[in-house]
Amino acid sequence: MAFAIRNLSVLAYANGFTLWHYKSGKDRLDVVSGGNYLGDACDMLTAGDLIMTTAADGARILVVTVADLETVITAPLS
């Protein structure tokens, strides 16, 4: 499966920070958190945003580390 923008929703927003939820459907956590999976949402996401991700094999909170004109890179929140 690929990223589906309809499965990305805002949970909270304040002072330039957004908390998101993404339900990936059949994609696994390693796919969702790797590469440029969320690249189609690059105009919505900002570095520092958090994404609560629900995937086929569990859940994880991701932090957006890079969000520019074409790329979104995330890392697990630690």
Image: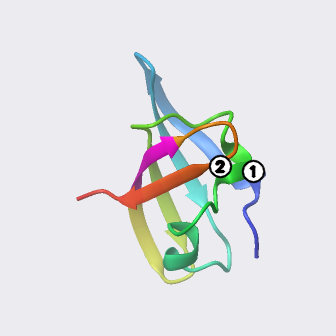
Residue type at the position of mark 1: Ile
Q: CA distance from mark 2 to mark 1?
A: 5 Å
Q: Residue at x 70, y 54 (%)?
A: 7
Residue 27 lies, with reference to residue 34, above or below; the image says below
Q: Position of residue 53 (x, y in %)?
A: 50, 61
How many numbered marks appear?
Answer: 2
Q: Position of residue 60 (x, y in %)?
A: 40, 65
The kind of secondary structure element at disc 1 is: helix
Residue highlighted by disc 1: 5
Q: Are marks 2 and 1 in contact (CB under 8 Å)?
A: yes
User: Which residues fall within the magenta stretch?
Assistant: 62-66
Is disc 1 surrounded by few (<14), some (14 to 19) or many (20+) residues within 10 Å?
few
Residue 70 is a magenta residue: no
Viewport quadrant of the C terminus? bottom left
- Residue 76: quarter of image: bottom left
Residue 73 lies, with reference to residue 2, above or below; the image says above
